[in-house]
Amino acid sequence: MSTDAKVFTCPHHPAGLAAPQADECQECGSRVNLRMCASCGHVGCCESQAGHARAHALGGRHPIIYSVPVGRGFAWCYEEDRYL
Ligand SMILES: [Zn+2]
Ligand SMILES: [Zn+2]
Ligand SMILES: [Zn+2]
C-alpha cells in the first residue's frame, strides 16, 4: 500500500489506517470493485456484488470502508451513511 494514501477522518475512523489483508474479496474471491475495512484491513466486495464489505462493516463494529485501491477513491462511514 502506498504511504501517501489519503486518509479520511470522521468520529468513527480508527486512529490508524489498516493495510489490506488481501487483494480479493476474502469471502467470495471477487477482484473487482473491492472495499477495505479501515479498522482491520478486511477486503470485501461492493454492494452491487455480494456486499461482503458491507456485511463486515455492519457485523464487526468497523464502520469505515475505503474503496480499493486505497487512497485513490472514496471512504464511506456506515455509522453516518455518508461519504467522508
Ligand atoms: Zn463516521
Ligand atoms: Zn464478496
Ligand atoms: Zn474490519
Image (cartoon, rainbow, N blue to C red):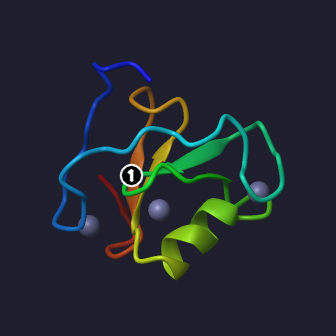
Instruction: Give me the residue at 32% from left, 26% from top.
Output: 5
Against 78, is 38 above or below?
above
Instruction: Give me the residue at 53% from left, 29% from top.
Output: 69
**Direction from residue 41 to residue 21 in the image, left or right:** right
**Direction from residue 24 to residue 55 in the image, left or right:** left
Q: Which residue is mark 1?
A: 38
Indicate the quadrant where residue 80 lies.
bottom left
Indicate the quadrant where residue 11 lies.
bottom left
**Direction from residue 28 to residue 32 in the image, left or right:** left
Instruction: Give me the residue at 30% from left, 20% from top.
Output: 3
Against 26, is 81 above or below?
below
As helix, strand or loop, the secondary structure at mark 1 comes to loop
Residue 61 percent location from the top left of the image: 40, 77
Against 30, is 80 above or below?
below
Against 23, is 3 above or below?
above
Is disc 1 surrounded by few (<14), some (14 to 19) or many (20+) residues within 10 Å? Answer: many
Quarter of the figure that contains the N terminus: top left
Q: Is mark 1 within 8 Å of ligand 3?
A: yes
Residue 18 percent location from the top left of the image: 37, 44
Indicate the quadrant where residue 81 lies.
bottom left
